[in-house]
Amino acid sequence: MNIFFWGVLLLFAGGIFALVFADKYKTKIITLFSAISAILCSIPAVNVLCNNEILTQTFEFNDIFGSIKFGIDPLSAFFILVISIMSLASVIYSNGYLKGYIEKGSAVSSHLLFLPMLIASMLLVVTCKNALMFLICWEIMSLSSFFLVIFEREKKDILKAGIKYLVFMHISVIFIILAFAFMSIQAGSFDFDSFKEILENNQLTANIAFLLAFVGFGTKAGFVPFHNWLPDAHPAAPSHVSAIMSGVMIKTGIYGILRMLSLIDMPSLMISYTVLVISVISALYGVLYAITQHDLKRLLAYHSIENIGIIGIGIGTGMLATAYGHPYVALLGYAGGILHILNHSIFKELLFMSAGSVYTQTHTRNIEILGGLIKSMPYSAILFLIGSVAICGLPPFNGFISEFLIYFGMLNGVTINNFFAFITFMFAIAGLALVGTMAILCFTKAFSIIFLGMPRSEQAQNVKQDVSKSMIIPMGFLAILTLVIGLLPQYVFKLLENPVAVITRTPLELSESTIAIMQQISVIMSAFLIFVIVLIGLKIILTKGKIQMHETWGCGYDRLNNHIQYTASSYASPFLSMLRPLFKKVFDIEKPRKLFPKSAHFSLHIEDIEEEYVIHPLVKFDEWFLSKFEKMQSGNIQTYIKYGLIFLVIIIAGCLLIK
């Protein structure tokens, strides 16, 4: 594992080394160190995945920590590859994205120090096998990402979103600490191997530990109802940071859940049903609120909740099948969930980067005032379209493959001879189908309003060119990956065999039958792609020189303008009107007055119901409660000394009473 640790050290060193260079060279230094690190970390990961090996390295610390073990098994190796490759793509993208900030004189030194620190901490999280060291790495990951989120901290809403993120991350770590403490007390050790022994032999202990861990890791991942930080933090962060957070960082929460499952011999029915139901609700909730958003990055953030729900559906399917003793269904569920971790990382990074390109050129994230950008930003438009098709789970891109495996697993799960399992799987199948339908509605809205039609504002009209190559190249690389996985799923599935086996211990014969299905899909996908290419080629040949341009009929208007186009709100309104009880609507209306009104406007904002009815009341109560202690802050030093003495007397008296 030495080569892996050298890769991690290079990330830390790159952030420190870049400090001595001028700002315009810092991103290039970080990119160089990140590229070398990604190669070094990927070498042992690929070796473990291909050969089904386990690499370990033990460090002797003090009496408190004891021996701290780091290890790369196939599950860790899979996450190392995802973290290394996806993070490198975002770092390359940051060269173009941060250029405008550097030219304006913005300080980027601390930002570029915390960026590789975040990547390094994630790599350590997925390889650490000691509870105490895991928590330290976890906290470094949370703190470094917090400082990345508040890059533009002079803006009040961004600072507010960063603080909210930090609060939720510490709620998350409290539950993880409780889970680890509960297991450590019974095991007498902080080592994960000792946890495995007690969890395999005691079902009640396993249930309590898993539920505590699920709340902690689920908060980081963004499961409903622990999701509330995510729609605020992702839009606040720079786009390359949003890409890493959504594409990679929230997956460390999924890693924590999968690692807990690898320590449990067989999950109970209770926790299996719980995970599956919460996952379906998360997927539906995320995509439903994504449709209502006018902020492009906030829309994508809610889709992260949706896709975490889809990953959870795969994991929940695997857990339920394992509990009922159906290994093939478990294989399909876990494989679909784990593959969707990779797929979501690819197309969500692509979409966040595309959103960053739009923001770089227009300086707005408001979908309502964009339009017509496909003419001035053709590459970004095409790449956004590819990401949109992939996230909707449509062929021939990668999202279809992982969702197919999850569907196939649930359809086979219906055959389990249990009424509750049958009802649950039918509910999950219907839920996932509805999620796919709403995702198509959301991304047809987003793409058409942003890139098609006429510009709706000066910001959109003034865009004259696309973004730089340093931003287009990583997006193009991710777009190619979505197509490669969609066309060659059988080879990707072979890489999933060993990570899935860490959890399921599935016989190889079951994997081979699934690979045969993947090969058939590959042939169909390839034939479909060739057919589409031939059709496009024929259209170009047959219509060459015969196309005439005409203005679109404007329903009687003699002059087209941007006011007769669909808006994002009007596009989604017919669907959303059927689901009114699920939203908190906030209207801003200025009605036209007099015969010739000088001004009038209408806007609609959708509030998250959890934010409105749970988070806000809690914050208000907290403010009220703390206000009762304002009188104690007199500013008088003698009074503060008096409080300290009283506190010490109470502590001493308490200790004497205990004795």
Image (cartoon, rainbow, N blue to C red):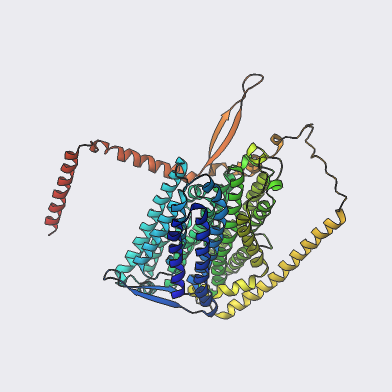
* Residue 616, position as x, y percentages in the image: 42, 41
* Residue 237, position as x, y percentages in the image: 50, 49
Of the 4 image quadrants, the one containing the C terminus is bottom left
Residue shown at 23%/37% (left/top)? 635
Question: Is 147 placed left or right of 366 in the picture?
Answer: left
* Residue 265, position as x, y percentages in the image: 43, 74
Identify which residue, 68 or 308, lies in the foreground. Answer: 68
Of the 4 image quadrants, the one containing the N terminus is bottom left
Q: Is residue 242 above or below residue 457?
A: below
Residue shown at 13%/49% (left/top)? 649
Residue shown at 16%/39% (left/top)? 638
Q: Is residue 572 above or below residue 318?
A: above
Residue 417 makes an appearance in the image: no
Report the label total: 0
Q: Quadrant of residue 185 in the image?
A: bottom left
Identify which residue, 304 or 334, lies in the foreground. Answer: 304
Identify which residue, 628 or 543, lies in the foreground. Answer: 543
* Residue 589, position as x, y percentages in the image: 57, 30
Identify which residue, 504 or 233, lies in the foreground. Answer: 233
Question: Is 352 placed left or right of 539 in the picture?
Answer: left
Q: Quadrant of residue 271 in the image?
A: bottom left
Q: Is residue 478 above or below residue 369?
A: below
